[in-house]
Image: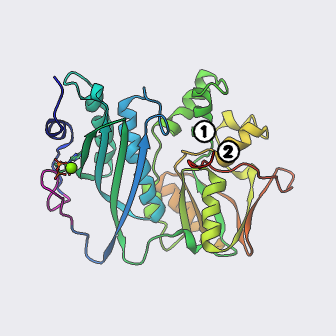
Amino acid sequence: MVLSEFEIIRRYFTRAAPGAILGIGDDAALIRPSAGSELVVSTDMLVSGTHFFPGVDPRKLGYKSLAVNLSDMAAMGASPRWAMLALALPASMLQADEKWLEQFAAGFFELADAYEVNLIGGDTTRGPLAVCVTIIGEIAAGAALRRSGAWPGDDIWISGQLGGAALALAHQLGQITLQPDELAACLPALETPVARVGLGQHLPGLANSAIDISDGLLADLGHILDCSKVAGVVRMAEISCPACLRKYLPQPFAVTCLLAGGDDYELCFTAPRARRQEIETLSRIQQASVTRIGEITEGTGLAVLDAAGRAMPLDIQGYDHFRT
Ligand code: ADP
Ligand code: MG
């Protein structure tokens, strides 16, 4: 038996939404932001064959489809509250005995429950597998962290480690071969990334600008520099990365994973030098490691210095879906 759209929604996605006035089941949901706050809204689409392998573990896909959206909230300094889920599903996944949807929903709600995000609606249609999540969060009016706020003299910080997701992907694509323990160290970054929500929520008032690293450090820090009309210097040796990647530096493929590898969903933010201590304290409280990797300067462009302090040639770029 093939499940109807109505049956899919009822079975797998209809949950109580205590944080909404009206959740799933009407023509639209009703939400009310807390007094004095602004709504923060973002959408991310994951398409089979482009963003994930067709045979991906559905539970991990459900988890990641929300995680990448939580990461956008973190990058704005916002608190995630509500989500909408639009699904295009091939007929094979609509069979009543198919566990795919059950697993997908389990992964999605595992993360939604952890952050008290209410699923308040969406759309379900037949088609090539694609998952589109819209997230809605809130933040005190005027406090959101933008890409345009970096200032000369700011430190450049990143959370966590970079390059692990790209390294795991290179392994899955057969471009390199990782040892089982190395793969185990990198795969979570690719499959079940941790959005830095707690860290991000406490950055407004401390940081001047922020972005989440979805397309690689060069591309995403580049957006901060462009939007803020400033330049940046980054020391490659100071960028935190998994040991299994570090040992290949400075081989070109490892440098590419580190600087241009997408999908890490760590935060890159800039903050005045005077706030270093507070940021270190915040990092300890939130149990999210942070590393200072460089500085914002006057001018334009990004310089990445190698271990000897020489500017590296940067002909690598972040992942751009429309580049051929
Ligand atoms: P309409 O025809 O008015 O668009 P639908 O039948 O598409 O209504 O949706 C019925 C209800 O189910 C709506 O509240 C909608 O937001 C919700 N919904 C549909 N698909 C999903 C989904 N994949 N996840 C969560 N809610 C969904
Ligand atoms: Mg609809």
Is ligand 1 closer than 8 angstroms to the Cβ of mark 1?
Answer: no
Q: Which residue is mark 1?
A: 166
Is 22 on the left-hand or right-hand side of 236? left
The N terminus lies in which quarter of the figure?
Answer: top left
Q: Amino acid at mark 2?
A: Leu
Neighbor class of circle 1 (other Cα within 10 Å; few <14, some 14-19, many 20+) is many
Is 221 on the left-hand or right-hand side of 87? right
Magenta stretch holds residue 20: yes
Spatial separation of the CA atoms under disc 2 and disc 1: 8 Å
Residue visible at 59% across and 28% down?
173
The tag on residue 258 is 2
The C terminus lies in which quarter of the figure?
Answer: top right
Is ligand 1 closer than 8 angstroms to the Cβ of mark 2?
Answer: no
Residue visible at 15% across and 56% down?
27
Quarter where residue 23 is shown: bottom left
Q: Earlier in the sequence, mark 2 or mark 1?
A: 1
The image shows residue 112, relative to residue 40, as above or below, that is: above
Neighbor class of circle 2 (other Cα within 10 Å; few <14, some 14-19, many 20+) is many
The stretch in magenta equals 19-31
Is 25 on the left-hand or right-hand side of 47? left
Of residues 28 and 255, the one nearer the viewer is: 28
Q: Position of residue 68 (x, y in %)?
A: 44, 49
Are dots 2 and 1 in contact, CB under 8 Å? Answer: yes
Q: In terms of secondary structure, where does tag 2 sit?
A: helix
Residue visible at 25% across and 23% down?
98
Quarter where residue 291 is shown: bottom right
Q: Position of residue 303 (x, y in %)?
A: 77, 60
Of residues 258 and 84, the one nearer the viewer is: 84
Magenta stretch holds residue 104: no
Helix, strand or loop: magenta stretch: loop
Q: Amino acid at mark 1?
A: Ala
Q: Position of residue 87 (x, y in %)?
A: 30, 42
